[in-house]
Image (spheres, helix red, strand yellow):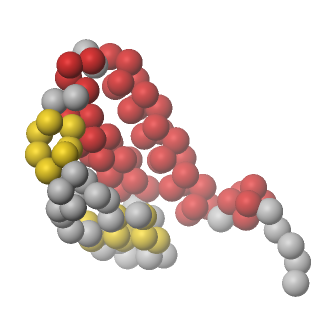
Amino acid sequence: MESINLKEYVEKNKDLTEILEAVKTSSIEILNLLRNLNSSDKNINTSKNSSGDIQNKIDILSHNIFVDNILETKKVTIIISEECDHPVHYNYTDSKNYFLL
């Protein structure tokens, strides 16, 4: 069996590359958001998630950024996040049924 490292695997897998690019884009957007938010805005408690953790404004905003960017790839059919009470399902005919947790 041929050995392959992660970099080679990702380079051969276009769908995974697109998903990872969306994660990278989301991370940069969240970093910029954090830089521009007042410190008091970052810690505003908005609600509790289903496991009882307090959700801050930045938690919700970050979740939405990730979901929006991942959806643009049309490669992920289920997204599960502690910021959402239930799995989010998307049906794309060209999807290979990637799940993002």
Q: Residue placed at 30% from the left, 73% from the top? A: 91
Between 73 and 26, the residue placed more toward the observer is: 26
Is 6 on the left or on the right of 69, as rendered? right
Is 95 on the left or on the right of 45, as rendered? right
Q: Is residue 51 visible?
A: yes
- Furthest-bottom residue in view? 1
Figure quadrant of residue 7: bottom right
Q: Is residue 65 above or below residue 20?
A: above
Between 29 and 49, the residue placed more toward the observer is: 49
Q: Residue 29 appears at what percent x and percent y?
A: 40, 31
- Furthest-left residue in view? 47
Is 16 on the left or on the right of 43, as rendered? right
Q: Is residue 46 above or below residue 98?
A: above
Q: Is residue 72 visible?
A: no
Q: Residue placed at 41% from the left, 64% from the top? A: 101
Q: Residue placed at 25% from the left, 26% from the top? A: 42
Q: Residue placed at 52% from the left, 41% from the top? A: 24
- Furthest-front residue in view? 52
Q: Is residue 73 above or below residue 86?
A: above
Q: Residue 13 appears at what percent x and percent y?
A: 65, 65
